[in-house]
Amino acid sequence: MALDPTTTPAERGPAVEPDPAAEGGRSVEPSWWRDGVLYQIYPRSFADSDGDGVGDLRGIIGRLDHLQWLGVDGVWLNPTFPSPNDDWGYDVADYKGVHPELGTLEDLDELIAEAGRRGIRVLLDLVPNHTSDRHPWFQDALSGRTARYRDFYVWADPAADGGPPNNWISNFGGSAWTFHEPTGQYHLNQFLPSQPDLNWWNEEVREAVDDVLGFWFARGVAGFRIDVCHAIVKDRELRGDPEATADDHPLIQRRGLRQVNSMNRPELHEVLRRWRVVAGRQEPERVLVGETYVLDLEQLIPFYGNGQDELHLAFNFLFVHSELDAAQLRAVVEGVEAMLPAESWPVYTGSNHDAGRLVTRWAGGDEARTRVALLILLALRGTPFLYYGDEIGMPDVALDPAQALDPVPHRRNDPSASRDPCRTPMQWSAEPGAGFTAGDAEPWLPLGDAAAHNVGDQRADPGSVLHLVRDLIALRRSRADLRGGSYQTLPAPDGAWAWRRGDGTAAAVNLSGAEVEVAGLGGSVLVATDRSRDGERVDGTLRLGPWQGAVLALDD
Ligand code: GLC
Ligand code: MG
């Protein structure tokens, strides 16, 4: 694919002029990914069409009606490419193919078309930081120091003592360097040794990934979630990472190092600008959503560039790693509101395939807390990403970590690190196989308690979590305030959080076990987590019981 990375957004023509007067003071133009709700599908675990116990693309096609009924605007599929599955698809062996267990390229084309017919866009998962060691590039690179693709990867000579070139550590534990005896050098792997890091200083790597983007855009893919977006470019001189300090986020202190040379390099923004050019010259423009795993807003905001030239959306892991606590969540949201450039747009999520499910992590399995968490996600200013199963209040599934298929608990020797519990099959019904797999196939990961949470039963129950999520999505769609309206914190007592959206809408949540009174609200309840309160009048004070929340239409 021909491309000219020097083209600036201005040369592509003017952006749509925002109209601040429209839609409750929104400062950015509407677009499907700002206004819509996105839904993350872990393809191996969504629906199995061929009875092998592994979810697949035809399974997803068969369940698109559910997504349309729910009202989502787009789906992000975790990696769908051929892979030895050492890290369940995040070890890509061919960027332009489909994993045979998931289906064929034709199945993916059909999924894109069938989803499109229902108004649902499809985002794939780009894994540009590393390949599988079985990718033909790496296989070639192993053949010698002068191999054609040697410089596609990060190689370095041993340190003077023969050990690794520097102190960089793998996110999955241990040194980030693996020695390759036959060629006498180490290769970098920030994840598994079988996930060698690509060398983003090599222009040919950049061109190769542009070509991958073009390949999928031409097939109608609406955009990409970009894996470990913050890690792609490494310090050119391979300087060591400094020690973490007491000022660092607890998760960074736990890691022990500040990853400022092994990742999070300023030079990575050149690559993001380059991808934005490729995405921007498509008709329609494609969307780039980064897995920007940084733990302070000063680092997160720059991933949006000037609001027009880098990522469209940068996942907010401060929000993910907050507790379901009014002060903590409000602080993150207020920070985003204060710091994000006017042209940029927030994104919020509570669950994913790494961090676990919000039902367990935030709500401790409690349904009232789950409901209030989902209401927050769907009422904030920003694009919500739901994870499959969030809509039925599906919890993580307790599994024996010794049996984990996820390599991380084994490598880190930390049973709590297993990501299997949040990757179990979708629970469609209470039948054997949970409607995930037909016949008597053994699902690739054990099923959770499908009798307790499943789509079929909840569809039949208007009071269910599923109907709450659907109704909140529909409310968002029908109310401009909830899609594009501004955010403003409203006064609320400790343990509660209230905010206005645009001119005419408010949300209030009680994240405590005591009843609270939120004063200064006049209007009517549109949707409450306790559905018996829908339609209730509020004259000045909204009383919220423990772990309750509501979205209100404010009086003029
Ligand atoms: C990202 C993915 C995670 C994967 C890792 C390495 O963090 O979300 O699942 O293991 O990258 O590719
Ligand atoms: Mg299958």
Image: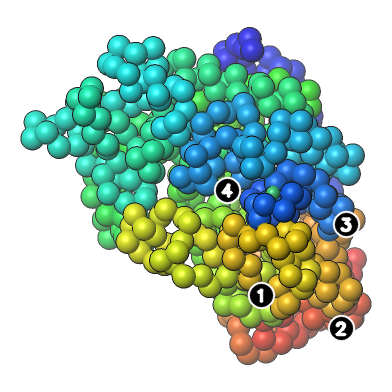
Front of the two marks 4 and 3: 3
Q: Residues within 10 Å of mark 3 (few under 14, many from 20)?
A: few
Front of the two marks 2 and 3: 3
| The one of 130 and 358 positioned closer to us in this rendering | 130
Which residue is disc 4 drawn over?
315
| The one of 186 and 245 positioned closer to us in this rendering | 186
- In three-dimensional space, the C-alpha distance between marks 4 and 3, rounded to whole angstroms, equals 26 Å
Mark 3 element type: helix
Q: Residues within 10 Å of mark 1 (few under 14, many from 20)?
A: some
Q: Position of residue 57 (x, y in %)?
A: 73, 43
Position of residue 540 in the picture relative to residue 42 (left or right): right
Front of the two marks 1 and 3: 1
Q: Residue at x 33, y 57 (%)?
A: 412
Mark 2 element type: helix
Mark 4 element type: loop
Q: Residue at x 45, y 52 (%)?
A: 296
Position of residue 500 in the picture relative to residue 398 (left or right): right
Q: Position of residue 129 (x, y in %)?
A: 46, 34
The quarter in which the C terminus is drawn is: bottom right
Which residue is disc 3 drawn over?
69
- The CB of the residue at mark 2 lies under 8 Å from ligand 1: no
